[in-house]
Amino acid sequence: MINRTLIRIKILQLLYAYYQNGGTHADTAEKTLLESLSKAYDLYNLLLLLMVDITRMADVIINDQEERNKVAHVETVISHRFLENRFVAQLSDNRQLMKFVDQTKTLGWVEDRELLKRIYAAITESDFYAEYMMMPQVTYADDRELWRKIYKNIIMKLEVIEDNLEDKCIYWNDDKETVDTFVLKTIKRFEEANGADQELLPEFRDYEDREFATTLIRKAIENCQYYQLLISKSVKNWEFNRLAYMDVILMQMALAEILSFPEIPVSVSINEYVELAKCYSTPKSHVYINGILDNISKRLIKEHKLIKK
């Protein structure tokens, strides 16, 4: 689940705070990074669990309504189609998700009853819920598609969910937008035939991504003076002093990546940090960063200090 884009974002955020607080130890920064990435994976599991707990809350609400109808001698039949959704039933039995629940008993949505009720109310008021409930028959694909729409149009957009996550963990509010894309990908990947053994996304795709994370943050910290020297040679002294603090960190990271990972093309690394600059720095930073990094890379290649495409 944790891809290199998320890793770069995490390192950027961490380094910004790290230098602001006068950090000097790469070991501490690396430990904090891995903890932050682990928390992002916890959030992934927690958001999957949210769909299960919304359904459980719906069950309580519908049962209560049926009891009230019985007492009032109201013969209205309430559909259980939402409760019998096969995608959520499969998700609730998923071995990997249940292992997460067992290992992190303090995480979950059981205590957030009002939040669950609010989300369920938003679901029942949606057009796609009404369409789903009016279908003559529903397939597993219909069940799964309903939850894809719920997640994309309600769970991803309700600010109250983000507020709740911010209270649970300091990392999660910044992570949710990225993790949401992984949850949507997971929903689409579910197949009924896989049952409880449906694979969820792994924390890291492979060992190389974890190694990428720890190496990148170490190199960015340990060689920061060298990278700043390279940057200063590509700009006038007064320009270097006026560079946005975030821009310097972005370029330090980019140079750490360009010089430490021979398998990643220079153009790929530069493009990644140009995109990050668009999101995290000033409106013109991405143009400036692109030019400086391109200039440094060409100079290093010419000086035979960088052998790369």
Image: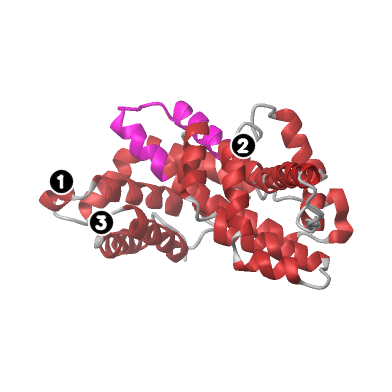
Give yes or no for contact between labels 1 and 2 (Cβ–Cβ under 8 Å). Answer: no
Residue 113: image tag: 2
Give yes or no for contact between labels 3 and 1 (Cβ–Cβ under 8 Å). Answer: no
Determine crowd level at label 2: few under 14, some 14-19, many 20+ residues with C-alpha closer than 10 A. few
Residue 31: image tag: none
Give the residue at x 34% y 60%: 278
Magenta-span inclusion, residue 2: no
Give yes or no for contact between labels 2 and 3 (Cβ–Cβ under 8 Å). Answer: no
The segment highlighted magenta reads 12-38
Nearest the camera: 154 or 7?
A: 154
Give the residue at x 29% y 53%: 281
Residue 127 lies, with reference to residue 95, above or below; the image says: below
Q: Label 1 belongs to which residue?
A: 241
Give the residue at x 73% y 50%: 200
Mark 1 vs 2, N-terminal side = 2
Determine crowd level at label 3: few under 14, some 14-19, many 20+ residues with C-alpha closer than 10 A. few
Q: Nearer the viewer, mark 1 or mark 2?
A: 2
Determine if residue 205 is in view. yes
Work out which residue is located at the far front of the displayed protein and give it: 73
- Alpha carbon separation for disc pair 3 and 1: 16 Å
Residue 223 in picture, x, y percent from top left: 37, 39
Mark 2 vs 3, N-terminal side = 2
- Alpha carbon separation for disc pair 2 and 3: 41 Å
Determine if residue 261 is in view. no
Q: Label 3 belongs to which residue?
A: 282
Determine crowd level at label 1: few under 14, some 14-19, many 20+ residues with C-alpha closer than 10 A. few
Residue type indicated by callout 3:
Thr
